[in-house]
């Protein structure tokens, strides 16, 4: 008997990282901790940048946008996963799955665009320092972010509309902890040629263009740093790029590693486990990478908490006054 096609009012089962019941409390605690650290760390970074006028520069403007996107990126997947573990219910509705897939794709692409913009910002700052303020003016920065949002919204919408036209079989188990575009296409019973073509074309176009832009920017940066005569100047120029280079390497290496490993092993479960690196670990580490060696961020946070403490003291004294 052939499986019955389902297109509407279907429910999917998110199998998660492991089906062993004794591991569920450990997975719940681990992911809850990582999610809270991610949200808190990125929120502090946004507060530091927005509260300090000295940090109202293109680099920190892109960084605060990246922090906001990282919070949204993890929030599309982790809360649902935690609810599923807590309630011991792996069901996600058809509409919920499409929505999760849409926002995951949207914020994942925005991450890539923002990392590319940050690489271009460092390229202009080091290779064309005298023209930096002229080239990287606030209007251009705002326009770049706006265009990125529009493009990502439209591409994510296209992917979602193409998935909506697919028919699904009775076996609706997703061997992952969230609804990923690739997994949704693999579950379909109908022809997925168009979906695969659009997905791979968009991935190659966006990933290839952004990675090429980042590599080109850093090749020029390295050659400019190498041409500097002062050792102190070389160190200062390189130190402004280290954080971004670490984040880019972490994001691209883990992302590429996930898809290459899944292509070689053909194991969806191992792919789901590996995807934790770029969906959870990378957004969690970003605030630490950018703040640990960054005196501006640490200074802004100290001033922010210092002002908060002063305001609290003043309010307490005012309350005590008759």
Image: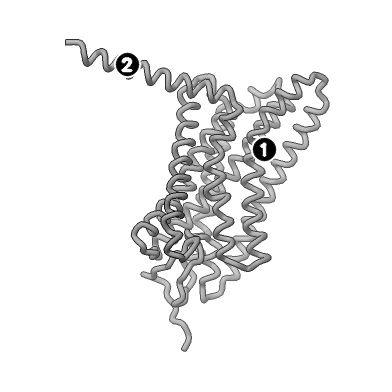
- Front-most of 240 and 261? 261
- Measured as percent of width and height from the top left, residue 99 is found at 43, 57
Of 42 and 108, the residue lying toward us: 42
User: Extreme bottom residue here?
Assistant: 1
**Pointers 2 and 1 in contact (C-beta within 8 Å):** no
Give me the residue at 73% from left, 25% from top.
Answer: 128
Which of the numbered marks, if any, corresponds to residue 245? 1
* Rendered view: 91 above or below 229: below
Number of numbered discs on residues: 2
Q: How is the image coloured?
A: one colour
Dot 2 or dot 1, earlier in sequence: 1
Cα separation, mark 2 vs mark 1, equals 41 Å
Q: Where residue 210 sits: x, y (%)?
A: 66, 45
The label nearer to you, 2 versus 1, is: 2
For the point 68% across and 48% down, the residue is: 209
Query: Which quadrant of the figure has residue 85?
Result: bottom left
Q: Position of residue 37 (x, y in %)?
A: 46, 40
Outermost residue, top side: 322
- Give residue 313's mark: 2
User: For residue 304, which quarter of the picture?
Assistant: top left
Q: Secondary structure at mark 2?
A: helix
- Looking at the rendered structure, the secondary structure element under dot 1 is helix
Q: Is residue 136 above or below residue 261?
A: above
Residue at screen point 73% across, 36% down: 218
State the mark number for residue 33. none
Specify whether 86 is left or right of 273: left
**Between 165 and 74, which is closer to the camera in this rendering?**
74
Give the residue at x 42% y 68%. Answer: 12
Question: Does residue 38 appear to the left or right of 290 in the view shown?
Answer: left
Single out the residue that lies furthest toward the left.
322
Q: Position of residue 44 (x, y in %)?
A: 46, 31
103 to 170, vertically: above or below:
above
């Amino acid at each position: 008997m052939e499986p019955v096609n389902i297109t509407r009012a279907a429910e999917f089962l998110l199998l998660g990282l492991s089906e062993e019941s004794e591991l569920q409390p450990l997975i719940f605690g681990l992911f809850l901790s990582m999610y809270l650290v991610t949200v808190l760390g990125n929120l502090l970074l946004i507060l530091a940048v927005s509260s300090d006028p000295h940090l109202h520069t293109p680099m920190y403007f892109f960084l605060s946008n990246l922090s906001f996107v990282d919070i949204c990126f993890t929030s599309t997947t982790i809360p649902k996963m935690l609810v599923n573990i807590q309630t011991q219910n792996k069901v996600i509705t058809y509409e919920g799955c499409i929505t999760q897939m849409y926002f995951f794709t949207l914020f994942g692409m925005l991450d890539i665009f923002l990392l590319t913009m940050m690489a271009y910002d460092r390229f202009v700052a080091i290779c064309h320092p005298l023209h930096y303020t002229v080239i990287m003016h606030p209007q251009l920065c705002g326009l770049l972010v706006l265009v990125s949002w529009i493009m990502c919204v439209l591409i994510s919408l296209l992917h979602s509309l193409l998935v909506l036209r697919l028919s699904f079989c009775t076996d609706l188990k997703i061997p992952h902890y969230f609804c990923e575009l690739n997994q949704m296409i693999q579950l379909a019973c109908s022809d997925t040629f168009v979906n695969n073509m659009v997905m791979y074309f968009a991935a190659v176009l966006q990933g290839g263009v952004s990675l090429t832009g980042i590599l080109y920017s850093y090749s020029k940066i390295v050659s400019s740093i190498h041409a500097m005569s002062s050792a102190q100047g070389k160190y200062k120029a390189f130190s402004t790029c280290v954080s971004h280079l670490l984040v880019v390497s972490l994001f691209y290496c883990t992302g590429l590693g996930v898809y290459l490993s899944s292509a070689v092993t053909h194991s969806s479960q191992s792919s789901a486990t590996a995807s934790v690196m770029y969906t959870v670990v990378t957004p969690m580490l970003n605030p630490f990478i950018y703040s640990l060696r960054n005196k501006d961020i640490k200074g802004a946070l100290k001033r922010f908490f210092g002002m908060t403490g002063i305001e609290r003291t003043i309010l307490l004294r005012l309350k005590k006054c008759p």
